[in-house]
C-alpha cells in the first residue's frame, strides 16, 4: 500500500459508511467518489458503481458494505483495481481475486461496517495543525422552496445523492438516478472546481450525457427523474439555468445564499422542483 493508496482507502471507506444500511459500493479515484451505487445484491451495486465513470474507475480503490463473495469478485474480472475494502471475503472470492492479479490489495475490516462516527480530523499546515470535527452531518432541514412540488418518491434518491456528494471535493455537484426500482447510482459528478458552474456544466452534466449515450437511455426521461445535488448553496441562479438547459427537473441544495430568492425564481421559471437541505459540506 502506497501513501496514495491509504488516502484513497480511507476516503472510500468513509464514503461507504454513508451507505452501510444497504448493499453498496463506492469507487474512489484521488479521494473522490467517481462511482457509487446501491443494489439488490452487492454484485449489482458494484457493477452499477463502476458504470458511473468507467474511465476513472481504472486503477481505483473500492469499498463495499457487505462481504465479498465469488459473484462480487467476478465483477472485477478484467478490471484493474488498486485495492478492495470489504467487511470480509469468502474463500472462493479470495481464491478468484488472488488468481486474478497479484497487484490488487484486499483489505478486510476487523468489524462490520457501521455508520460514520464523530471523530476529530487533523490537517498539517506550515507552522501548525488544523483540527476539526469530521463531517458526519445529515440534512438539518428539508424545505421545498419552489412552486413545483418535490416528489416524495424521489426523497430516497435525493438522500443518496447527499450522502455521496458530501464526500466529493468542493465545489461538488452530483447527479443521482434510480437505475432500477429502489436502486441508486451516480449518473455524473463534478469535483474540486474553483467555481460551481464548471463543476456542473463541464464535469457533472457532461459525464451524465456520456453515460446516458453509452447506455442507450432516453436523455429526456433520464434527466427528468434524476436528482441534482450541490454540496453548498448556489451563489447565483446561473447553476439553475445551466441545469434546466440540460433537462434537470429536481435539485437539492443547502440554501442560505443571499441570492436564494433569485435561485428560487430561476427554478420556478424553469418548472424545476427544488428543496433546501439546510446542511453545507465544503469538503477540502
Image (cartoon, rainbow, N blue to C red):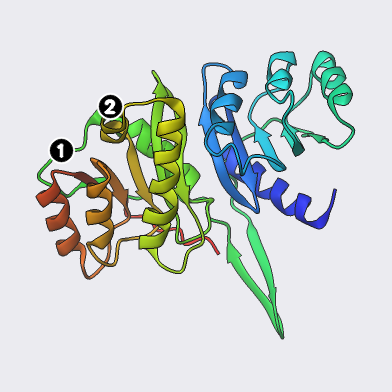
Depth check: 123 or 146 in front?
146
Tell me the element at label 2: helix
The residue drawn where x is 66% and y is 24% is 66
Q: Is residue 258 above or below residue 106?
A: below
Q: Residue at x 50, y 56 (%)?
A: 191
Instruction: Report the label total.
Output: 2
Per the image, label 1 sits on a secondary structure element best described as: loop
- Residue 246 is situated, as x and y percent measured from the top left of the image, at 27, 45
User: What residue does disc 2 label?
Assistant: 153
From the image, tell me which residue sits under label 1.
Answer: 149
Percent from the top left, x then y, of residue 73? 73, 21
Percent of width and height locating residue 229? 36, 47
Q: Considering only vertical position in the picture, is 266 above or below 187?
A: below
- Which residue sits furthest bottom? 127
Quarter of the picture holding the C terminus = bottom right
At a point 68% along the width and 67% down the height, the residue shown is 122
Amino acid at each position: 500500500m502506497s501513501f496514495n493508496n491509504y488516502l484513497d482507502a480511507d476516503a472510500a471507506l468513509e464514503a461507504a459508511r454513508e451507505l452501510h444500511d444497504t448493499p453498496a459500493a463506492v469507487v474512489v479515484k484521488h479521494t473522490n467518489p467517481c462511482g457509487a451505487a446501491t443494489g439488490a445484491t452487492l454484485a449489482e451495486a458494484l457493477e452499477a458503481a463502476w458504470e458511473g465513470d468507467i474511465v476513472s474507475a481504472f486503477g481505483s480503490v473500492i469499498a463495499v458494505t457487505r462481504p465479498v463473495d465469488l459473484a462480487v469478485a467476478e465483477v472485477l474480472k478484467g478490471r484493474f483495481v488498486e485495492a478492495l475494502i470489504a467487511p470480509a471475503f469468502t474463500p472462493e472470492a479470495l481464491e478468484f481475486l488472488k488468481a486474478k492479479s497479484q497487484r490488487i490489495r484486499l483489505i478486510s475490516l476487523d468489524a462490520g461496517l457501521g455508520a460514520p462516527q464523530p471523530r476529530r480530523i487533523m490537517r498539517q499546515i506550515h507552522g501548525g495543525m488544523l483540527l476539526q470535527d469530521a463531517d458526519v452531518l445529515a440534512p438539518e432541514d428539508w424545505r421545498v422552496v419552489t412552486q413545483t412540488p418535490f416528489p416524495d418518491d424521489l426523497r430516497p434518491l435525493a438522500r443518496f445523492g447527499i450522502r455521496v456528494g458530501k464526500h466529493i471535493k468542493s465545489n461538488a455537484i452530483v447527479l443521482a438516478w434510480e437505475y432500477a426500482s429502489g436502486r441508486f447510482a451516480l449518473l455524473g459528478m463534478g469535483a474540486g472546481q474553483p467555481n460551481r458552474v464548471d463543476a456542473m456544466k463541464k464535469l457533472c452534466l457532461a459525464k451524465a450525457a456520456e453515460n446516458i449515450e453509452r447506455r442507450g437511455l432516453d436523455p429526456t426521461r433520464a434527466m427528468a427523474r434524476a436528482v441534482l445535488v450541490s454540496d453548498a448553496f448556489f451563489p447565483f441562479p446561473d447553476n439553475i439555468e445551466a441545469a434546466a438547459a440540460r433537462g434537470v427537473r429536481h435539485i437539492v441544495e443547502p440554501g442560505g445564499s443571499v441570492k436564494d430568492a433569485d435561485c428560487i425564481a430561476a427554478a420556478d421559471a424553469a418548472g424545476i422542483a427544488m428543496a433546501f437541505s439546510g446542511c453545507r459540506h465544503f469538503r477540502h
